[in-house]
Amino acid sequence: MFENLQGRFAKVLNNLRGQGRLTEDNIQDTLREVRMALLEADVALPVVREFIETVRTQALGEEVARSLTPGQVLIKVVHDELVRVMGQANEALDLAAQPPAVVLMAGLQGSGKTTSVAKLARWLAERQNKKALLVSCDIYRPAAIEQLRTLAAEVGAEFFPSTKDQDPVAIARAALDHAKRHYKDVLIVDTAGRLHIDAAMMDEIRALHAALDPIETLFVVDSMTGQDAANTAKAFGDALPLTGVILTKTDGDARGGAALSIRHITGKPIKFIGVGEKTTALEPFYPERLASRILDMGDVVSLVEEVQRKVDHEEAARLVQKLKKGGFDLADFRDQIKQMATMGGMAGLMDKLPGMGQIPDQVKAQVNDKEMKRLVAMIDSMTPKERAFPDIIKGARKRRIAAGSGTQVQDLNRLLKQFAQMQKVMKKMKGGGMAKMMRGLKGRLPGMGGMGGMGGLPPGFPR
């Protein structure tokens, strides 16, 4: 997410770290680079100007000048300004209304609106224990109605049927009546999108708004359209009393201009970001956490929350007990990879770790979900006895496992060699605890063979 912006900022701020003294000249050089980074990220020009001016004023102030570590203080100034631009704090959904609370979704065609409706329903069920009713008022695209019906079934939400022959306002009123009679907590209304803003679309969505009086009116926008996303959001904001924005497809957005521009241009908060295609890939928007990611400080808070929510804690406790006895086999390793997949895979995990911007792309490319799937395939092709006692895997067994998993014998040899090293380290858990284990694991994790001794790991990684 936002790799280009992260890479440029990492280069700029690395030059600041360790500076014993900051002068007007090197502050000017730094701000010039920051300005270029923001413009290349497609951040709106008014936002860039205000950002640079604010940072310049604070950088030349007494706090930075008197600090014993002025470089670090200036990095904090940049971080705090990023947070301010994006909105200071997460603004949660306001559902404090007589049930059902109505959430109206607006946006252009192709922005990910219908998928976001389902993602939001799932988020409300899993995080807030709310029962949602979903309805599509998009009578112009029958496929949109069917898409929402399918997604509603996937996320376990009730779907209110509609057809292309009905009036959108009549559909919405009937859905609201159904939600009231069946004690739903939330009604989420999907509206028609267009390829561009037009008067007919705006008139229709105003009529829907008037009929439903929603407590939340959310604008769904594709982050990859950059500052155009902010301009489109403003046009909708002028026509509708928007309460917030859902920024979609951020996992594919290398720039980040929309995230930094929307709040400034529209005055509306980003409430959620879409971080993938799956219906689980919706996160509340925390400006401070995203600012930390942009500055390559990671997002450990989100990572910990995700672990607490998604990891099978009984399984984790079982593994800890097994490790204490010095046992760790290939079946355990496979289970850990599968747990990792529930947390967004290697890409999602690495995105939240501090210092990842300092690791070369060719190294990060070796630590990917495709490689992890190959490892699982090889382990799945083994018998239970082979997983428990990998030393018995010799010639004929190796050929059978490789053929069964669609890999080469040398791939299996690499896995077995790396696992043997890993197993030795795990046995140290009996006498040395987690710190000793993590020190010993450097460079030995299967799937990370190209990282060697990992001597160039950034601060924050176990050494």
Image: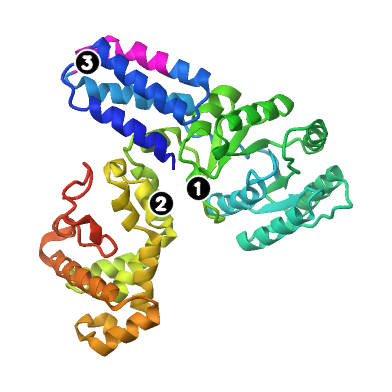
Residue 195 place in picture, x, y as percent: 72, 40
Q: Are marks 1 and 3 in contact (CB under 8 Å)?
A: no
The residue at which mark 2 appears reads as 348
Q: Which residue is drawn at the image coordinates 33% and 41% (left, top)?
A: 298
Image vertical order of residue 390 relative to residue 295, above or below: below
Please identify the quarter of the rendering in which residue 394 is found. bottom left
> Viewer-nearest of labels 2 and 3?
3
Inspect the magenta stretch and tell me whether residue 198 lies in it.
Answer: no
> Label 2 crowding class (10 Å Cα cut-off): few <14, some 14-19, many 20+?
some
Residue at which label 3 appears: 22
Kind of residue at badge 3 = Leu
The residue singled out by tag 1 in the image is 275
Q: Earlier in the sequence, mark 2 or mark 1?
A: 1
The answer to whether residue 58 is magenta is yes
Horizontally, residue 114 falls left or right of residue 211, namely left
- Looking at the image, is 76 positioned above or below residue 24? below
Q: Amino acid at mark 1?
A: Val
Element under disc 3? loop
Res 44 visible: yes
- On the image, the x and y values in percent for residue 223 come to 55, 38
- Badge 1 density bin: few <14, some 14–19, many ≥20, Cα 10 Å: many
Left or right? Give the position of 289 relative to 417: right
Q: Is disc 2 in contact with disc 1, using a CB cutoff of under 8 Å? A: yes
Please state, as top left, top right, bottom left or bottom right, where the N terminus lies in the image. top left
Magenta part of the protein: which range?
52-67
